[in-house]
Image (spheres, rainbow, N blue to C red):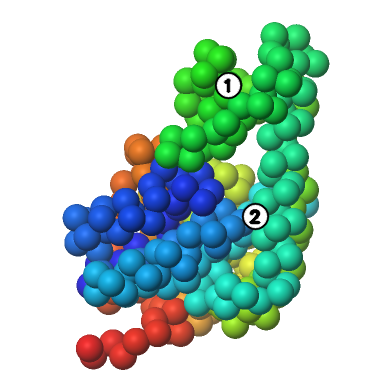
């Protein structure tokens, strides 16, 4: 059974609707998948309905943004109750923070001398089918950057005072997932996004009620995957994996890559059906 437990849709910064996602899931030969949009569950219910319609196994998921000592970390939540109050409040808080960051980044670019009209930005309508987010699409259309990599390399930088907001702590995200009956998993711990040592990251989160580790991820080298699996086994943690696919928005993130099979993972309660069926 081919598995992909980290996928984004138009609800956050992916370019595929649930219908397009499920069509691509079928073409990729994936049997079990999760929708894990950033700080929103807006497309989870529709994705689950389509998965059932086409005989696919599905897991309700989300990817929550957190901050620890100025560093960003993402926590995946699986098998969540999408109506849980604490989780809903946290996601709304984070989503509002990112919208505020969008607005502030344009204001700061203007203050830095880049000729932009803030009112034009406010009135601008971002097309979710492009993937990404409003400020990125606006700046691409104004000819100031070409894609997300260019955006983060040359515009969204400390040089003009732009950075990610201070999100709630990982501890709060983990607690919200637990309160929603879900399973918290540390996303891509070995990616450059975290900027810290893999062992240090894993040891910290191992003390914070994390249930599992996303060992398989496209940003992980073979050595990272091996070390993350070994650490997870030593500490009795679940072993998950996913493509972190964003559809056409990030073409290097291919659905179903890395090619992960069910027997390579340790999913425990993430699986909600009898394995022998």
Residue at 67% across, 60% down: 91
The circle on residue 65 is 2
What percent of the width, then of the height, locates residue 154?
60, 20
Choose between 223 and 163: the one closer to the eye.
Answer: 163
Residue at 59% across, 62% down: 75
> Considering the image in quadrants, where does the C terminus appear?
bottom left
What percent of the width, then of the height, locates residue 4?
34, 62
What percent of the width, then of the height, locates residue 214?
47, 64
What percent of the width, then of the height, locates residue 20?
32, 51
Q: Is residue 179 left or right of residue 223?
A: right
Residue at 58% across, 24% down: 138
Instruction: Report how far apart the C-alphas of labels 1 and 2 lie in the structure.
Output: 23 Å
Q: Residue furthest right?
A: 111
Choose between 118 and 224: the one closer to the eye.
Answer: 118
Which residue is denoted by mark 1 in the rendering?
139
How packed mark 2 is, by other alpha carbons closer than 10 Å (few <14, some 14-19, many 20 or more), is many
């Amino acid at each position: 059974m081919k598995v992909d437990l980290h996928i984004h849709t138009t609800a956050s910064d992916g370019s595929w609707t649930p219908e397009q996602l499920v069509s691509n899931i079928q073409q990729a030969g994936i049997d079990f998948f999760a929708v894990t949009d950033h700080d929103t569950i807006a497309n989870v219910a529709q994705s689950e309905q389509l998965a059932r319609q086409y005989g696919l196994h599905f897991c309700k998921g989300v990817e929550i943004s957190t901050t620890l000592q100025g560093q960003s970390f993402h926590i995946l939540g699986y098998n969540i109750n999408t109506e849980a109050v604490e989780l809903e409040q946290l996601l709304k808080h984070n989503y509002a923070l990112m919208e505020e960051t969008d607005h502030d980044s344009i204001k700061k670019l203007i203050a830095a001398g880049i000729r932009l009209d803030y009112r034009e930005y406010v009135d601008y309508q971002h097309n979710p089918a492009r993937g990404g987010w409003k400020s990125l699409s606006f700046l691409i259309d104004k000819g100031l950057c070409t894609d997300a990599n260019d955006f983060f390399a040359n515009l969204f930088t400390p040089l003009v005072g732009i950075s990610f907001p201070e999100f709630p702590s990982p501890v709060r995200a983990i607690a919200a997932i637990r309160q929603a009956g879900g399973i918290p998993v540390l996303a891509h711990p070995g990616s450059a996004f975290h900027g810290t040592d893999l062992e240090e990251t894993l040891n910290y989160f191992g003390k914070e009620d994390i249930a599992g580790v996303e060992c398989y991820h496209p940003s992980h080298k073979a050595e990272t995957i091996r070390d993350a699996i070994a650490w997870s086994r030593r500490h009795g943690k679940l072993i998950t994996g996913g493509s972190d696919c964003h559809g056409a928005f990030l073409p290097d993130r291919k659905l179903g890559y890395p090619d992960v099979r069910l027997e390579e993972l340790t999913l425990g309660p993430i699986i909600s059906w009898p394995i022998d069926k």
